[in-house]
Image (cartoon, rainbow, N blue to C red):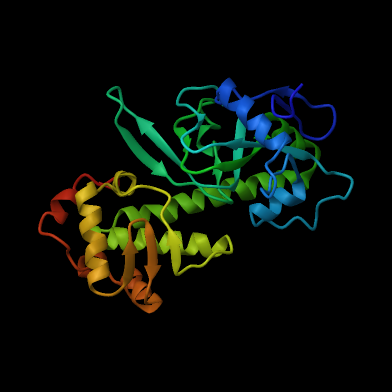
Amino acid sequence: MSAISHFEIGSGFNRSAPPGADPDILASCSEEVVEPKRGRQSRIWSNIYDVCEILHLPCEHLASEEKPTFQHLQFKTGHRIHAIGQAFDTLYIVNSGFLKTVLRDDFGSEQVLSFPMRGDILGVDSIHTKFYSSEAVALSECDLILVPFNALVELGRKKAEFEKIIYNVMSRELFRKQALISLLCAQKADAKVARFLIYLSEKFHEMGYSRSAFSLRMTRQEIGSYLGLSLETVSRAMSALKEVGVIGVDQRSIKINEGDVFKLIRSLPAQRSRAVQPGAQRTVKTSKCQ
């Protein structure tokens, strides 16, 4: 039995790998995790304290005898984690890497919903329907922690401290979604792009990386899909921000030159944001918040 074909929480709990994962991908992931390449950091298991640290949740109150373990699963760039409509039974915690969640229509067009990275959770929005409501795809090599939802609920029933962790996780995800709504409701294209870069800057800082220099893992087309803008509008907005000296742009590399300027842009009312092109207002009419 491979280390990835089954996983467990604590002792005596085993189950098949989640249906959203491709068997061929699981096989390749298993080889990577069990026999990691020299020099590459890789883990097979994380305990509850590791998970709480990744999620930035307090865990000092947890009883020392309760140490459930959660298995890791690695995905390569472009691999799908779960698909729309597949039965939900697992939450995925991002330990490392970058992903996107999308909706797809009958013609294959996609609408980007989010860009999960370390500390984010996939699948929370599927608890109610019992089916994954979106598709998750790796934008880079990813290491995810698998948390079987039924086993997590059972832990919550047995121990009040675990139940509190579950509530904290759900509440945080709702808070993050509400915070991102304000980003999407900016009326001007350059304000949307600026706020998106601020969001990424803060996320990178939270993960221990530089908040002033980072590389975009997503394409400008994917950014546009997420913000409700066209590829051309995103490019014009970045050029406008570069022109006024707020950012430096070298393909996917972003350098924030003046943090104070970004704070100013973030605090300005949407209608005072500088318009990049006359057509930007027409583009916003298709925004998610309309």
Q: Residue at x 25, y 65 (%)?
A: 270
Relative to the observer, which residue lies in front, 285 or 249?
Answer: 249
Residue 260, by quadrant, is bottom left
Q: Tell me if residue 260 can be seen.
A: yes
The percent coordinates of residue 230 (x first, y second) are 22, 47
| Residue closest to the far right | 65
On the rendered image, what quadrant is the N terminus found in? top right
The percent coordinates of residue 94 (x first, y second) are 59, 45
Asked if residue 280 lies left or right of residue 253, the reply is left
Instruction: Give the answer, above or below, for where 68 lies relative to 276.
Output: above
| Residue closest to the far left | 278
Q: Residue at x 70, y 29 (%)?
A: 4
Asked if residue 32 lies left or right of residue 290, the reply is right
Asked if residue 76 lies left or right of residue 197, the reply is right
Q: Residue at x 34, y 76 (%)?
A: 261
Q: Residue at x 69, y 44 (%)?
A: 42
Q: How many marks?
A: 0
Asked if residue 60 lies left or right of residue 172, the reply is right
The percent coordinates of residue 35 (x first, y second) are 72, 36
Instruction: Give the answer, above or below, for where 80 lies relative to 166.
Output: above
Q: Tell me if residue 187 can be seen.
A: no
Residue 251, by quadrant, is bottom left
The percent coordinates of residue 96 (x first, y second) are 59, 48
